[in-house]
Image: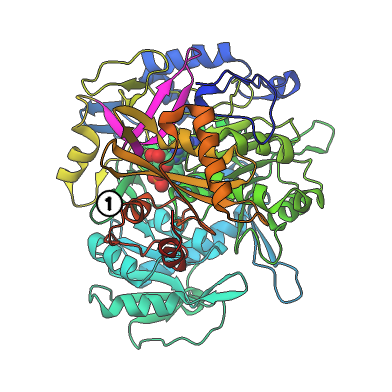
């Protein structure tokens, strides 16, 4: 192992997560204005949230609107948790009406930017809480007219336009269960989800814009519906005016559905444990799992995590007739992912902070799309993924320097481990060394943030998602369930229930028990490996199935990847194991180079040696293959099982329908090690 390098960093400095000793405490100015101002305050509150969860969560739930208060905060019968039992509420009411009741109806709820039009300018729509209630109520009444009832599963397959938010909130308003499918998925994904959820209605659009092209959403739905005959009704929003076929009796235009619908639709009283939505997430094997989230606990937890993780502040009167500007929040995810569900809509709106959603892509029409949006809307809190950050690094800082992004105050990251190089770049180039970075670890299943810094309280370290959120009792254990010692790798578990935990896998109790509750007795297992350092900070080491055992040594793929990208020629890297005659498992690295650098055998050797030098010879990749890009799913995750097949010289067997760019597979196969 190399020595810690302290604060010195050049692109060729080893920044292995095991060696990371840089610490970034929040500034005094930031802490003073924050909800949670110090680590002592965090620790005291965290202790209380674990020792007295019922009083802790009751106080938080009290901040929101309930038609009827609960009788019992928590009913825990392992592995089933019920929260706010006996209470009734409506999350749509809490997202919209509660703000209107407080006199904020004219405040902005959602800011939307279209993909730039032909003149290069985007269309911008701002919806106040009044606008949102009107549109949501009209569509909710339209759904009722089409026969949708409380408890029905409504499939939504839409582009990133306000109507996607309106459709989901309309479902929540009338108690229908939405099942949102990411607009980048294909017909077979729609068919699978419709059938699994037994959904009779699909809401879609004619198309959506992405990089100047139309994504043919309605055509995809039509194709899916040739494969299943469950669906009786399709509602189509007219977005791109592309040619589509409307099936008589089955298909209805959105504008016609709402044309005669009333603007008043009371929010249904939902029992706290009524199902709110299903969201499919892929498992390591088999068909996707329909993760179930219910109403009360999910609402309370996403509200609180949004508030504290991003330190959200609403616009308030300043006492002199003016207003103190509050936050403008932007999460770049698609609503089709859990990140969009929890941290564009459901957790954000109850916090009375405008939430921005955008249509399109970060590099269209130019690679400064994000910085342009931030500058024009004066975004203060920004939430994106490591894969995007690494793309920005590759494109170069000149795209950022064209804009004034000094409005930014907190930067968030989610979705995969962030390598320290990318963290430092985010900190310096985007945050100008003044914005706390919140590296949030969580999952579709957890509903909300589980391990995360709180920006006014936590001292951060590049690559660590730091400490558990309130109410989260996380630990790193061995296969017997015993806590491992400091800095030792193990299995990440959660030992106590939390309000937004998944309530099951739709229609598959066995798989729910087997996947999450059978590995370590009494604990939720997330499927991630982790370690905890001497400061109590957690470090995610990747999925447990990403850990490779080379000649008897446990190596986190993340660690080797970090070493690879610390070489100045390397832009991005992915590492997998492959069957090796001598070692059992060998290390195969797939590497993309920084733009303009030539792929030579000499460079290959240099990069491999670089890893050996930084991590020790055991970690030196046995094979290294250059590739123009890594195979990623549409949510930006590297598809490792595909790389494993390629590294092993096997035929690719698994499903690759979720791959963003399928041509990569061919290119990968052509290149040699
Ligand atoms: O492996 C972890 C990784 O993403 C998984 C969850 O994926 P998904 O359900 O699609 O949700 C993504 C958005 C919450 C986790 O099991 N992951 C997510 N966030 C992080 C992460 N790994 C390391 N650091 C993170 N901040």
Work out whether residue 507 or residue 531 is closer to the camera in this orientation and state it. 531
Query: Residue 518 appears at what percent x and percent y?
Result: 18, 32
Q: Is mark 1 within 8 Å of ligand 1?
A: no
Query: Is residue 456 in view from this perspective?
Result: yes
Query: Residue 176 appears at what percent x and percent y?
Result: 34, 57
User: Over which residues does the magenta segment extend?
Assistant: 523-547
Position of 514 with respect to 306 (left or right) is left
Position of 409 with respect to 318 (left or right) is left
Count every numbered label the image shows and give the total.
1
Q: Is residue 195 above or below residue 433?
A: below
Query: Residue 367 appears at what percent x and percent y?
Result: 70, 59
- The single residue placed furthest to the front in the displayed view is 602
Please say which color scheme the image uses: rainbow
For label 1, the SS is: strand
Query: Residue 133 appears at what percent x and percent y?
Result: 54, 57
Mark 1 sits on what residue?
Answer: 289
């Amino acid at each position: 192992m190399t020595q810690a390098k302290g604060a010195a960093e050049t692109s060729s400095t080893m920044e292995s997560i095991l060696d990371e000793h840089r610490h970034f405490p929040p500034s005094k100015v930031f802490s003073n204005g924050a909800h949670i101002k110090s680590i002592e305050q965090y620790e005291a509150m965290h202790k209380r949230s674990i020792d007295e969860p019922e009083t802790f969560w009751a106080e938080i739930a009290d901040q929101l609107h309930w038609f009827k208060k609960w009788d019992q905060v928590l009913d825990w019968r392992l592995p089933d948790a019920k929260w706010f039992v006996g209470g009734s509420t409506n999350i749509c009411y809490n997202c919209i009406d509660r703000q209107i009741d407080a006199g904020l109806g004219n405040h902005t709820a959602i800011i939307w930017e279209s993909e730039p039009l032909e003149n290069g300018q985007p269309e911008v729509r701002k919806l106040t809480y009044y606008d949102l209630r009107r549109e949501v109520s009209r569509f909710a009444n339209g759904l009722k007219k089409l026969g949708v009832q409380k408890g029905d599963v409504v499939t939504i397959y839409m582009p990133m336009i306000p109507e996607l938010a309106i459709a989901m909130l309309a479902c929540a308003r009338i108690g229908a269960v939405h099942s949102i499918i990411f607009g980048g998925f294909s017909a077979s994904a729609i068919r699978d989800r419709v059938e699994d959820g037994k959904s009779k209605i699909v809401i879609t659009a004619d198309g959506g814009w992405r990089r100047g092209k139309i994504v043919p959403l309605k055509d995809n739905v039509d194709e899916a519906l040739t494969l299943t005959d469950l669906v009786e009704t399709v509602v189509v929003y007219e977005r791109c005016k592309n040619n589509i076929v409307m099936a008589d009796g089955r298909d209805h235009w959105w504008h016609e559905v709402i044309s005669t619908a009333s603007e008043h639709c009371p929010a249904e009283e939902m029992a706290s444990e009524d199902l709110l939505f299903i969201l499919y997430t892929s498992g390591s094997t088999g068909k996707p799992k329909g993760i179930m989230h219910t109403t009360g606990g999910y609402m309370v937890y996403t509200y609180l995590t949004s508030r504290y993780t991003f330190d959200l502040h609403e616009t308030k009167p300043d006492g002199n007739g003016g207003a103190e500007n509050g936050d403008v929040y932007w999460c770049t995810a698609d609503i089709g992912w859990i990140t969009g569900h929890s941290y564009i809509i459901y957790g954000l709106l109850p916090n009375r902070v405008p939430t921005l959603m955008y249509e399109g892509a970060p590099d269209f029409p130019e690679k400064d799309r994000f910085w342009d949006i931030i500058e024009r809307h004066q975004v203060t809190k920004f939430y994106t993924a490591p894969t995007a950050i690494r793309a920005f690094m590759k494109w170069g800082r000149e795209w950022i320097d064209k804009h004034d992004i000094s409005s930014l105050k907190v930067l968030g990251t989610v979705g995969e481990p962030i390598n320290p190089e990318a963290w430092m770049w985010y900190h310096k180039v985007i945050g100008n060394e003044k914005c706390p970075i919140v590296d949030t670890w969580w999952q579709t299943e957890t509903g909300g943030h589980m391990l995360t810094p709180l920006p006014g309280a936590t001292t951060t370290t590049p690559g660590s998602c730091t400490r558990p959120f309130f109410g989260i009792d996380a630990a790193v254990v061995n296969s017997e369930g015993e806590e491992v010692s400091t800095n030792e790798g193990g299995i990440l578990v959660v030992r106590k229930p939390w309000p937004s935990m998944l309530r099951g896998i739709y229609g598959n109790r066995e798989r729910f028990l087997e996947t999450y509750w059978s590995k370590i007795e009494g604990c939720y297992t997330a499927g991630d490996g982790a370690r905890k350092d001497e400061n109590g900070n957690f470090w995610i080491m990747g999925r447990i199935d990403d850990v490779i055992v080379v000649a008897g040594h446990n190596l986190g793929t993340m660690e080797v990847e970090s070493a690879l990208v610390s070489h100045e020629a390397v832009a991005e890297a992915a590492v997998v194991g492959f069957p090796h005659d001598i070692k059992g498992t060998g290390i195969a690295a797939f590497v993309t180079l920084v733009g303009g650098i030539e792929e030579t055998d000499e460079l290959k050797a240099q990069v491999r040696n670089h890893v050996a030098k930084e991590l020790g010879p055991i970690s030196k990749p046995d094979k290294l293959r250059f590739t123009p890009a890594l195979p990623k799913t549409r949510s930006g995750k590297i598809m490792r099982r595909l790389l494993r097949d390629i590294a092993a010289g096997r035929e690719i067997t698994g499903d690759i329908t979720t791959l963003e760019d399928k041509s990569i597979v061919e290119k990968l196969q052509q290149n040699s090690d």
